[in-house]
Amino acid sequence: MRYLLLKHYRGGQAPAVDWTSMDQWTPEEVDAHMQYMSDFAKRLEETGEFVDSQALSAEGAFVRSDGAGRPPVTDGPFAETKDLVAGWMIIDVESWDRAVELAGELSAAPGAGGEPIHEWLEVRPFLAGAHGSPE
Amino acid sequence: MNEAPLRDLVPGVIGVLVRRGADVASAEDAVQEALIRAFETWPEDPPRDPKAWLVAAAWRRFLDAVRAESSRRGRELAVETRAVEPPTDPAPAGDDTLRLYFLCAHPTLSPAAAVALTLRAVGGLTTKQIAEAHLVPESTMAQRISRAKRAIAGLRLDQPGDLGAVLRVLYLVFNEGYGGDVDLAAEAVRLTRQLATLTDEPEVAGLLALMLLHHARRASRTGPGGRLVPLAEQDRSRWDTGLIAEGVAILQTALARDRLGEYQAQAAIAALHADARSTSETDWVQIVDWYDELLALTGSPVVRLNRAVAVGEADGPHAGLEALADVDPDLPRHAAAAAYLHERAGDLEHAAALYAEASHAATSVPERDHLTREAARVRQLLRAPTISPGSPSPATGP
């Protein structure tokens, strides 16, 4: 089964730990955090559970149609209050429990002082496509 | 069987078919079929003249396809009456290949379409390989390629080609490539090398030199976990001196022709970096001179930005900031360049804020992570001002 682990810049759940933004950490703490993320992805590749990982820029806007013959309406750049997706990882695992276990690990990436940041990750199962599970 | 020398023959063979009257799409299909046949039969029975074999096999397949098509439509196609027997080939082989470069990079095509078609028809890569390199589904890439083929189907080969467009496409190929097994940078070098044997335009040599000089530093540009290593921190003992020597020699020959262009100027800047043992021993004054040439040639705002960073090295950070004042602040990497120059000027508070701002504006993960680290590094200096500052490293620059 495939699951999406969704990471938010802001919005979503209120943070469990109020960690400072990364540029306020020491360079060693930044390195340790990034190393943890890359080790995590590498380990999932080795277990055959990794599918994809992408990061999104904080730039962008909401867009919708405003009717035929009119240009689309845009709202943004995103206001500070809006939920903002930072990126995701897609995993292919045996069960919901395994997806939760892995999301828990990913959320424990170290932050300032080497303490786990305990950030909320949204875990969402993929619906199967018209021809069963997407290949 | 080694695939690479066979792929070297592909554009020439397509070129012959196109000159004989085939459109690029049919020629390309026919050559792909001939290649499959070659892979099946050559290991047992290698031909004396591989190119002639491929031309004959592909031409036969092309005619079969035309006959099948014309009988289906119930009418004769002009090409069949005029070209069932191969005409004699008066044109030098190189001209056919060169025309194919021009067609595949035709200015009517979007850059993405031109890149895909060039890799397919000139490079002889499979659609699957091209799709994997660009992280798109194979069916998407197949559509992109067939739309590109349709777009150039009506174009005649006797029109003069736009060499500048070809060079832009090859440089794009050199700078992209995200996944899969194919090394697009190496493929771009191969295709540019081949182009350099077909034309003696100094800008082709300039682009080849530029690619070789950049390629030579590749191993040192990324650290563990894909982290970006800026020029100042690169381990120069890992630079490929063979490629550097070749790039410099090609550049010198091109420059001696006294027909300067943007790729030669960029290669000259890359050569000055390649020639230095460290950033402090780099001839920044001459680099600024080359940026002035490049700016006169292109008027590019990105060049203006990189020039400001070089001025900061040649004449000090305040001069660099003055040069930066003329640069459009909306440019990507403007904040990164400003952060670097402010740090050099001793304004750490401002530099840290700018590095953080720059990390939010970054367009790639390695660049974003690098700038986040730089912000963290400068903030640490601010917290402990007695520690001697480390050397800042520009994310911009070649």
Image (tube, coloured by chain):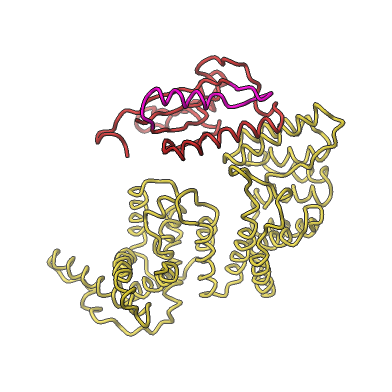
Q: Colour of chain A?
A: red
- Rendered location of residue B273, percent (x, y): 73, 58
- Rendered location of residue B202, percent (x, y): 61, 71
Overall secondary structure of the magenta section: helix
Magenta part of the protein: which range?
A: A93-117
| Viewer-nearest residue: A3 or B100 | A3
Q: Residue furthest left?
A: B74
Total labels drawn? 0
Q: Is residue A98 magenta?
A: yes
Q: State which quarter of the image contains the N terminus of chain B.
A: bottom left
For image coordinates 50% across by 59% down, the residue present is B169
| Viewer-nearest residue: B247 or B320 | B247
Residue B53 higher or lower than B373, as above or below = below
For image coordinates 32% across by 71% down, the residue present is B38
Q: Is residue B265 left or right of residue B19?
A: right
For image coordinates 68% across by 40% down, the residue present is B334
Q: Quadrant of residue B64?
A: bottom left
Q: Residue furthest right?
A: B386
The chain coloured yellow in the image: B
Residue B179 higher or lower than A99, as above or below = below
| Viewer-nearest residue: B279 or B353 | B279
Residue A110 higher or lower than B33, as above or below = above
Q: Is residue B183 magenta?
A: no
- Rendered location of residue B62, percent (x, y): 26, 71
Q: Is residue B278 left or right of residue B268?
A: right
